Image (cartoon, coloured by chain):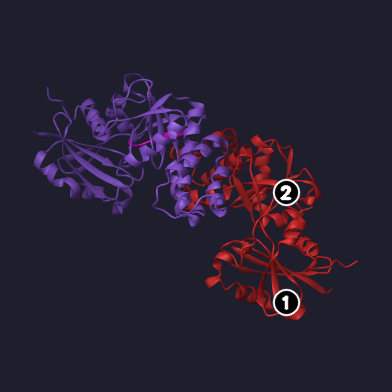
Chain colours: A purple, B red
């Protein structure tokens, strides 16, 4: 089938290109190691052409991208759209950069909101996934990751508001650069230790800077062996996140969207917290990009 | 005056030796860069002799040490004494290592307790400072640092219980290795931004993994300039710590013990939280070491 759109998912540490047909279906996918941060001297056009220059030559179809490529550290900054944020606003604020003469990349803006704590919050890339995830008004969607996002959907497919939790970054920092990592042996799954961590994090979410230290003392005291400590810490942090989010916004059920392993952890932890879960269907990113492109008139759905 | 004790403060990143007179007064002090972690191949005796071998030769007085030198990564592990922990228990559990023939170092054990969350907690080095700080039963003492300690004193100078907060380590990890540090410019004090961070941390202590992200969005949105972001994050973290500790153990006043700059930050933050502060008098570490040595019969106070 004829190609109609090249959809680029360009994050901090990944670059994926999808060639889509006239129904938004996937014709071909490619990825390159390293994302925005791995491109030397801001040579973004070169990086993109290396990955899919032949598609651009062959198909001459529009290009759309979402993710950190639209950040200040990316190719060109695409200013955040304020919540409630839906497709029309995003489609009207695409930022255009020239890839080569005759080829323009359209960058989807991130979105922003102000939390109930009065503090700004931002996302870039996840908004496009949310628009592609088939969510309904009132749904809560959790996107686990370096910076986990909890998003609440409003009418007309808009993202009503959201909150960021630095759960994944904390896990990485504490295990790779901190004192907790020194007692740990990595690579072994320990579900029961993960569960114990979740329960502790859920119970002690008002006490995060203290309770994380349990992942050291449990090792020092021999309560948990070195192989169990990584999952214990992972459980504590995910428990802290879930308790924080649900204490302020009680949830009966949430939709999980993201990496399979990580979604599995959140399923378990949310189950312990008494929250039902379902998984978003695959392909939310390209489906979201396709929907933005349709809205912007870049692509046209075939009857 | 005649020397009667060599008192060693040997932590993770520092080594200080004090030569004390027969009243525990300071005759001379020396320090060497690098602590337990900086000693190559566990050659602790060499490191100590390099710093104060001449004192040992000249004065032939007992040696006592406190701090991480008694940890598993140190010279020899000195098992933790359980809370409530006072001088008699510590003095009876000194661990002896030979420095050179005829010279023995006595290592003060750390202490441990179980928190109201059912989790083990430990300290090593701070217990000796607490015993030397002239605290009374019922006092709460806060020792800010990489791992801040809040300690509550019981009868007979015992440490009744305590809690660790990883505040300083979080600040270091987030600024040196994390994404928050990328927007920051260091080296400028911004008291009003620090205060704003404290207020946010105090108000949002149930929400730590989220609210720390404010130190990124405030930069992205231009609310706080790069020079203000370090103090904003510092304030948020210290606010989180204080709110966590005081929510569970309400305090009217606390005693601060430690680094002058850091104690200044905590004074400000505790003031915002409505907690009165006083500073412990200087020299708590050597005074504590002196008191342990007296209790153990290593030193004798002159009349």
The disc numbered 1 marks a residue on which chain?
Answer: B
Mark toward the viewer: 1 or 2: 2
The answer to whether one can see residue B182 in this image is no
Q: Quadrant of the N terminus of chain B?
A: bottom right
Q: Please tell me whether residue A120 belongs to the stretch shown in magenta.
A: yes
Q: In the rendered image, which quarter is residue A134 located in?
A: top left
Residue drawn at x 64%, y 53% as measured from the top left? B123
Q: Secondary structure at mark 1?
A: helix
Q: Which residues are magenta?
A: A119-125
Q: In the rendered image, which quarter is residue A130 located in?
A: top left
Q: Nearer the viewer, residue B200 or B48?
A: B48
Q: Of the residues under marks 1 and 2, which one precedes in the sequence?
A: 1
A248 up-or-down from A262: above or below: above
Q: Using residue B177 as the reference point, say whether residue B50 is left or right of it.
A: right
- Residue labelled with disc 1: B55
Residue B31 point in image, percent of width and height? 66, 68
């Amino acid at each position: 089938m004829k190609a109609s759109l090249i959809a680029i998912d360009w994050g901090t540490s990944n670059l994926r290109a999808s060639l889509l047909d006239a129904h938004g279906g996937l014709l071909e996918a490619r990825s390159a190691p390293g994302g925005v941060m791995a491109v030397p001297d801001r040579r973004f056009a070169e990086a993109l052409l290396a990955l899919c220059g032949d598609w651009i030559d062959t198909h001459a179809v529009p290009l759309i991208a979402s993710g950190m490529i639209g950040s200040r550290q990316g190719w060109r900054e695409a200013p955040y759209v304020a919540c409630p944020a839906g497709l029309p606003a995003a489609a009207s604020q695409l930022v255009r950069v020239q890839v080569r003469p005759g080829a323009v990349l359209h960058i989807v803006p991130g979105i922003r909101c102000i939390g109930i704590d009065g503090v700004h919050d931002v996302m870039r890339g996840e908004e496009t996934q949310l628009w592609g995830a088939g969510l309904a008004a009132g749904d809560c969607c959790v996107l686990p990751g370096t910076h986990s996002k909890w998003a609440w959907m409003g009418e007309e497919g808009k993202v009503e508001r959201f909150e960021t939790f630095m759960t994944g970054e904390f896990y990485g920092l504490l295990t790779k650069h901190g004192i907790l990592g020194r007692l740990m042996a990595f690579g072994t799954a320990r579900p029961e230790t993960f569960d114990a961590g979740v329960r502790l994090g859920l119970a002690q979410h008002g006490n995060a800077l203290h309770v994380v230290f349990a992942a050291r003392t449990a090792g020092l005291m021999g309560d948990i062996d070195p192989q169990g400590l990584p999952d214990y810490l992972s459980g504590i942090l995910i428990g802290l996140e879930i308790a924080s989010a649900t204490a302020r916004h009680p949830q009966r059920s949430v939709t999980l969207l993201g990496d399979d392993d990580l979604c599995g952890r959140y399923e378990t932890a949310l189950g312990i917290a008494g929250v039902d879960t379902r998984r978003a269907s695959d392909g939310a990113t390209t489906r979201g990009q396709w929907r933005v492109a349709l809205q912007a008139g870049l692509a046209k759905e075939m009857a």
